[in-house]
Amino acid sequence: MKKAIVLGGGGFIGGHLANKLKSEGFWIRNVDIKDRHEFWKLEDISDEYIQGDLTDPKIVEKVFKDSEGEYINYDEVYQLAADMGGAGYIFTGENDANVMHNSALINLNVAYYSHLAKAKRVFYSSSACIYPEHNQMDPNNPNCEESSAYPANPDSEYGWEKLFSERLYFSFSRNYNLTVRVARYHNIFGPRGTWTGGKEKAPAAVTRKVAEAEENSSIEIWGDGNQTRSFLFIDECIKATLMFMRQDNFAGPVNIGSEEMISINNLAKMAIEISGKNLSIDNIDGDEFIKKYGFKCPMGVRGRNSDNALFYDKMGWKTDKKLVDGISETYKWILGQL
């Protein structure tokens, strides 16, 4: 039986990934700082679930060994663990030190012990946040083609750490022959993920606001709402991740995302239409935002859209899942959580 370890398997993408691997017949060790997954039964995502802080090298050493203290030669290692969240967590500046420190330690530990355990291949989930801020100022024409990452100028410490860790895994590949795959995720969304509390991403935040809103009321959108993004549904993300992980010709980095770009205001209008409610949009920014929340409105770059030409060239695949269909599924799921 093949063995896989999902680091960060108590999170959104990790839970879906572990569930898919288990359905394929893998023996799964799932590791997360949380004691359980909020939305999955443990038996559906793991054969063994270990609660542990991956910033601690002793914990990482433990999860790469069996009960006899021998290293496990995992067939597949998936490194998804990070200190992260939505715009309200990443872009205020208040969490920069924790984001840099915690995520860097996790990746330093995972790369090192993947090497010592002679893991057969390692997947690292990087992010679209690594792309230079100056290439994403035009909401209608952002540049997120893979080679545009340098000269580096990410718009957040989260992005800087991701870029560092890309180089970390590739250095272990060069120096220790560790087989790695590095993908840059672009705004993955869908059911069974964080949808409230401040760390949720835009699709979850918007659909939650719509689901909670009373008829003939309004929902609040941070900023002018003209900032653009593309969003990839979770099932398509898992499909692309496994396809990329298991091919032998290309290590990355490569984008995994959708090219269906939309403004945040139009995303909100889409969710409102799906709900069937009569709602308006209240954009909040500037002094009004600061007065209400006590910090500057965190919006990130003005435009971001996945460029999937390289993935299609290497894999011959692109998503055909429409954003409206994914938002509809997400809205129905969040409605069921209320």
Image: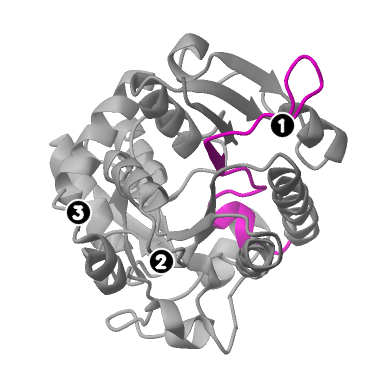
Q: Earlier in the sequence, mark 3 or mark 1?
A: 1
User: Is residue 59 shown above or below 168?
Assistant: above
Tag in front: 1 or 2: 1
Q: Of the residues shown, which amino acid type is indicated by label 2?
A: Val
- Name the secondary structure under disc 2: strand
The C terminus - image quarter: top left
**Residue 252 lies in what quarter of the image?**
bottom left
Q: Earlier in the sequence, mark 1 or mark 2?
A: 1
Q: Which residues are magenta?
A: 64-93
- Estimate the x, y position of residue 198 in percent, counting from the top left: 57, 43
Answer whether labels 3 and 1 touch (C-beta < 8 Å).
Answer: no
Tag in front: 3 or 1: 1
The residue identified by callout 1 is 64
**Label drawn at residue 254:** 2
Q: CA distance from mark 3 to mark 2?
A: 15 Å
User: Is residue 183 shown above or below 59?
Assistant: below
Q: Of the residues shown, which amino acid type is indicated by label 3?
A: Thr
- Name the secondary structure under disc 1: loop
Crowding at dot 3, Cα within 10 Å, few <14 / some 14-19 / many 20+, comes out as: some
Crowding at dot 1, Cα within 10 Å, few <14 / some 14-19 / many 20+, comes out as: many
